[in-house]
Image (cartoon, grey):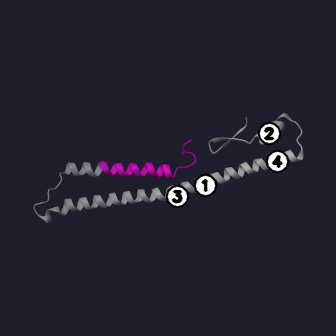
C-alpha cells in the first residue's frame, strides 16, 4: 500500500495511482495515457495538499490575531492594576481612617509573584502562537 506524507499525516493514495506507481517501479512500460493519468493524480494531490496548507495558515493567522489581542489586554490590565495599587499605597492616607496600608513584604510578594505569572503566561502564549517551523510540534 502506498502512502504519502502530507503535513505530518499519512494519506493513502488512490488505488489507480498505486497500480500505476507499482508498474513504474517494476520497469513495466507505461502507455502515454497511464503516464498522463499518473501526472494528473500527482497534480491533484499536490493541489489538495497546498489547499490544506493554505487553510491551516489562515486558521493560524486568525488564532494569532485573536489571542495576541487577548494577551495584550491581559498585560495592559495588569499594568493598570499595579499602578492603581501603588497609587493607593502611596496616597491612601488621604482618604481617612478606613485606609489600612499593606506591609512592604505583602506588597512586594503580591506584585512580584503575580507579575512573574503574567509574564510567564505572555511568553508561553506568544511562543505557541508565533512558533517557527523549527519549534513547531510534530
Tell me which label, 3 or 1, sits earlier in the chain. Answer: 1
Q: Quick check: marks 4 and 1 in contact, CB under 8 Å?
A: no
Would residue 85 be found to the left or right of residue 21 on screen?
left
Dot 2 falls on a residue whose secondary structure is helix
Location of mark 3 (residue): 62
Q: Quadrant of residue 6?
A: top right
Location of mark 4 (residue): 37
Q: Position of residue 108 (x, y in %)?
A: 24, 50
* Residue at 58%, 57% in the rendered image: 58
**Looking at this view, is 92 or 7 the one in front?**
7
Q: Position of residue 96 (x, y in %)?
A: 11, 64
Instruction: Say few, some or many: other residues with alpha carbon within 10 Å of mark 4 (under 14 / 14 to 19 / 20 or more).
Output: some
Would residue 70 be found to the left or right of residue 56 on screen?
left
Location of mark 1 (residue): 55
Q: CA distance from mark 4 to mark 1?
A: 27 Å
* Residue at 34%, 49% in the rendered image: 116
- Asked if residue 114 is among those painted magenta in the image, a careful observer would answer yes
Name above or below for residue 100 compared with residue 37.
Answer: below
Task: Indicate which disc residue 21 carries.
Answer: 2
Magenta residues (range): 113-138
- Asked if residue 71 is among those painted magenta in the image, a careful observer would answer no
Dot 4 falls on a residue whose secondary structure is helix
* Residue at 51%, 52% in the rendered image: 130
Name above or below for residue 22 compared with residue 95.
Answer: above
Dot 1 falls on a residue whose secondary structure is helix
Tell me which label, 2 or 4, sits earlier in the chain. Answer: 2
- Picture quarter with the C terminus: top right
- Picture quarter with the N terminus: top right
Amino acid at each position: 500500500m502506498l502512502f504519502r506524507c502530507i503535513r505530518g499525516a499519512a494519506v493513502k493514495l488512490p488505488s489507480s495511482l498505486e497500480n500505476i506507481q507499482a508498474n513504474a517501479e517494476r520497469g513495466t512500460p507505461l502507455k502515454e495515457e497511464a503516464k498522463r493519468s499518473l501526472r494528473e493524480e500527482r497534480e491533484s494531490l499536490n493541489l489538495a495538499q497546498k489547499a490544506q496548507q493554505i487553510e491551516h495558515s489562515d486558521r493560524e493567522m486568525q488564532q494569532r490575531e485573536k489571542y495576541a489581542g487577548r494577551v495584550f489586554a491581559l498585560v495592559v490590565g495588569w499594568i493598570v492594576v499595579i499602578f492603581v495599587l501603588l497609587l493607593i499605597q502611596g496616597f491612601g492616607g488621604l482618604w481617612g481612617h478606613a485606609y489600612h496600608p499593606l506591609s512592604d513584604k505583602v506588597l512586594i510578594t503580591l506584585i512580584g509573584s503575580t507579575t512573574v505569572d503574567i509574564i510567564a503566561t505572555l511568553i508561553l502564549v506568544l511562543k505557541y502562537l508565533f512558533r517557527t517551523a523549527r519549534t513547531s510540534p510534530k
